[in-house]
Image (cartoon, grey):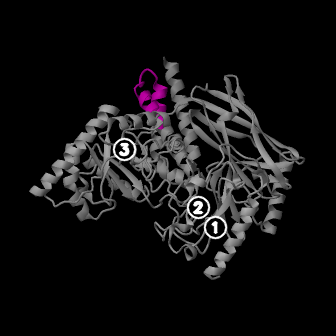
Amino acid sequence: MNVKSVMAAVAVSACACAIAGGESPATFRQRYKLDPAQERANAEKVAKDAAAAKQQGAKLAYYVVPAMGALKRLSGTYPVDGRPFGDVSWVAARDEYEPASVQFFPYQDEDKVEIVASDLVGKQGTIPASAIDFTVVKIWYQGGSAWYGYFHDNDNPQPVPELILHDENLIRVDDDTKDYFVRYDTPGLNGGYWQWMSARFEVTDYRFDGQALCTHMIHDADTIRPFALNKHEFKQILATIHVPKGAAGGVYRGTITVKAKRGELAKIPMRLRVLPLDLPEPKTDYNPDKGFYLCMYCSNSRFPKVNKNLAAHNAKNPMGFPSISTNEADLAKQLQQAKEWGLNVSPCFSGIDGCGRATGFPADEKTKAAMDKVRADYAAKMTAARKVFGEDFQAYSYGQDEGPLWSVKCERNNWRAAHEADLNTMVTSFNYNEFLCDLDFFIQPGMPVESRAENVRKFHQMNPDGICGWYANPHCGPESPDYMRRVHGISAWKAGYDVSANYCWYRSNWNDFAVPYEPNMRGLIIVYATADDVIDTLAWEGVREGMDDIRYATLLKQTAFKALKCRFSAPDAYHLARAALAYVAHWDGYRGDPDTFRKECVNYILKMNDLMKEAK
């Protein structure tokens, strides 16, 4: 098909979408084509499951499935890992966000489907239904390497579950052309119109025309909207609970009512176990007093909703926030914003002028004079920042990104000036061994595998107070929540890293098939920008789970270290602590099941606490 015919087809499709804009979101029906043989096989499996569960008369079949599993859940994929007609359940600590998931399998088309949760009630009290956020997992088309890869492949678009939406009507998918359209809300138009957002380079000519240039016109709803179910199509729903800070430990129960235009379809039991635990901030594996951070590139934002989203996902140190200057009034405003949003002001990563100035090395007189000015500027900003943020405030200035060895050598005069102003240095760099001696935050390209862990160990040896992060291979982009959970969580932690600093969190591009930034790549983002917020994804929820895995591991180690001090007063706790530390040390973060790891951490923590209490 030539470019003119492509654009003509797009015009027809866009026109049809605009006409459909008058529809109510409650009547929008997104259909995906099913293979007839697969559909029959699925219907037979579901019928057997219903009979085994004595639910032959149910109006709707449903499966409780792992929320962050590795299975790519498409509309025709039978959930082999699901529990038919099971309870939606969570196990979570106080103030933790925890996802659960259910897949519906309707026996007929259903209109205006709504999900209503009751309060969760236990002997200890009540947790309101408002603590649960329901979303639809939207399937759309992405590049051929989708789910695990991030390289460009426009010739083989793949359906992939990724977006977590309150309003499924925000995205419309053409299952014939394998295109997708994003709703632009426009004043004066009922429901807005749908912008073609999967145009290839043949149409966009390597320009940004195919991207979401008008993110200010993209809005998702605040809570889940009614949606449609299609006969014999699986649809995944995510239920994320935020346990209140003051919740008492124990079991809470409730129900989820699923109703549609024709009446009630199902009542699903809910069960929440609140652990009598408060999770600590994540610490490194090798040093329990040293923080572990999630600091994503392109995560600095002026929007409160975006920053609260970061904080809720354990990304409390966005790269570039706060912005350091000598303006104390502005610094005080940023401090207040950090408190409102739940962010940290220290350590501040890349929030101060870059330390990537190249000079001759060693320094001549001209270079020394220039560095005197640089040093004075840094010192003035650090003095102002510590006056507002406190004497313990730490900041890192960014150097030349992925510079060659000669660049690193030529930056070291600037790095020395930064150190003399009590400012730290950071940069993404390749492993230039001893030439990184003046670097304080080494961001090493490549996922955290064993071969790179040795570089991390040596960097810490020559920089005892230094920190090490990783990015790339994978970049942000793979949609699998299981994969992203592992590499940003326990795998990085066990490899000795201090930071997961992947590229990049978000930017304007929504088009996976024409990325002007890096034409050989897919869209290297993990969330999608809207007017004043972001669209979450399964991958982003996976990253949060990975950070929570680290928090549970941190609590286990903290509890074990307390128990090791009870060698004679509580010998059972002492020996259990040694077994717990051995379990963590030998657990395989690349191949082991992270849910099992989490449960074992909880078991060890609770048992050690009980044994230490009994000994008192």
The three-letter code of the residue at mark 1 reads Gln
| Residue 85 visible, this angle | no
Q: Residue 278, how many percent across, how many down?
A: 52, 30
The image quarter containing residue 53 is: top right
Q: Secondary structure at mark 3?
A: loop
**Does 360 appear above or below 154?**
above
In the rendered structure, which segment of residues is drawn in magenta? Answer: 555-580
Q: Residue furthest left?
A: 365
Report the magenta stretch's main SS: helix
Q: Secondary structure at mark 2?
A: loop
**Left or right: residue 402 compared with residue 190:** left
In primary-sequence order, the first of circles 2 and 1 is: 2
Residue 158 is labelled as 1
Where is mark 2, residue-wise?
Answer: 147
The image quarter containing residue 242 is: top right
Give the crowd class for mark 2: few <14, some 14-19, many >=20 residues within 10 Å.
Answer: many
Q: Mark 3 and mark 2 in contact? Answer it, CB < 8 Å.
A: no
**Left or right: residue 419 compared with residue 562:** left
Which is nearer the eye, 455 or 32?
Answer: 32
Which is nearer the eye, 376 or 495?
Answer: 376
475 part of magenta stretch:
no
Q: CA distance from mark 2 to mark 1?
A: 9 Å
Give the mark count. 3
566 part of magenta stretch:
yes
Residue shown at the point (45%, 61%) measured from the top left:
473
Q: Residue 416, how many percent across, how many down?
A: 20, 49
In primary-sequence order, the first of circles 1 and 3 is: 1
In primary-sequence order, the first of circles 3 and 2 is: 2
Residue 323 is labelled as 3
